[in-house]
Amino acid sequence: MSESVVQDFVQLLTPQGERVEHPDFSFADDDATIAGYLRDMVLARRFDNEATALQRKGELGLWPPCLGQEAAQVGSARAIRERDEVLPSYREHAVALCMGIDPLQVLGTFRGTTMVPWLSRNKRFHLYSFVIGTQTLHAVGFAMGMQRDGLIGNERQEDNGAAIVYFGDGATSQGDVNEAFIFAASYQSPLVFFCQNNQWAISEPIVLQSKIPLYRRASGFGFPGIRVDGNDVLAVRAVTDWALDRARRGEGPT
């Protein structure tokens, strides 16, 4: 691995559970907070396992598992504040739990008995998007609306908000996503693009999809991209904090 790639990789917790330092990002919360994150991840894994079993039994029409993405989802969700808005793809189940969505309501959506039974405007967790990549354009529009509502760049931090949109590595090859990058950069939208890269775009490996690491694509559109260890809940929280704060200040997308 080249030196530049190593420097671009944010990690605060090794796979062996050892805390490590990073020159630009840190996690300063206490052990009780970390224990809370572990609880979030365990609950998400349990929910995901149960729903996967229900789908295998024919009780759910579809269930895209979030297995292995618990740390990425919990770390990012715990950076979300009162005025922020969340636009998921179709497997942000851990984020849904962190945002207070009833698990039974999530299951109803995938069983086909309800659409989006939760009050997305109140919960600030919007509908699951099953068409790959479309939610990024929705998120840019939402973020631009937040700009015009005066929800960014205020002196009082609590008056500011931003949007965060989730998608997978395969979505980055979609035209919608690239259009979203262009509009977000052009209008300095207060938006965090959160790409959960599990190394596969449906059935194609990442090596067939992109000749460069996906986070480096951001620079071509004019905004920063950061590669984070998605199994490191502390690093994900720290980087998402930074990205959302940047958006809330009116400094554009990440």
Image (spheres, rainbow, N blue to C red):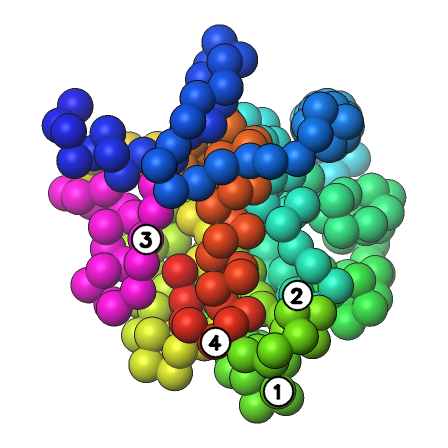
What residue is disc 3 on? Answer: 225
Element under disc 3: loop
Q: Is residue 99 left or right of 149 when viewed as pictured?
A: right
Residue at the spot x=35%, y=36% of the render?
Answer: 23
State which quarter of the image contains the C terminus. bottom left
Image coordinates for residue 182, horizontal then vertical, percent = 31, 74
Residue at the spot x=24%, y=55% of the render?
Answer: 217
Q: Earlier in the sequence, mark 3 or mark 4?
A: 3
Comparing 26 with 144, the one in front is: 26
Crowd rating for badge 1 (residues with CA inside 10 Å; few <14, some 14–19, many 20+): few
Foreground mark, 3 or 4?
A: 4
What residue is disc 1 on? Answer: 150
Element under disc 1: loop
What is the distance, in whole Å, between disc 3 and disc 2 at their CAs? Answer: 20 Å
Residue range of the region highlighted in magenta in the rendering:
210-227
Q: Is residue 165 left or right of 214 when viewed as pictured?
A: right
Q: Earlier in the sequence, mark 1 or mark 2?
A: 2
Crowd rating for badge 2 (residues with CA inside 10 Å; few <14, some 14–19, many 20+): many
Q: Earlier in the sequence, mark 4 or mark 2?
A: 2
What residue is disc 2 on? Answer: 84
Type of amino acid under label 1? Gly
Element under disc 2: loop
Image coordinates for residue 18, horizontal then vertical, percent = 50, 13
Type of amino acid under label 4? Gly
- On residue 250, the disc is 4
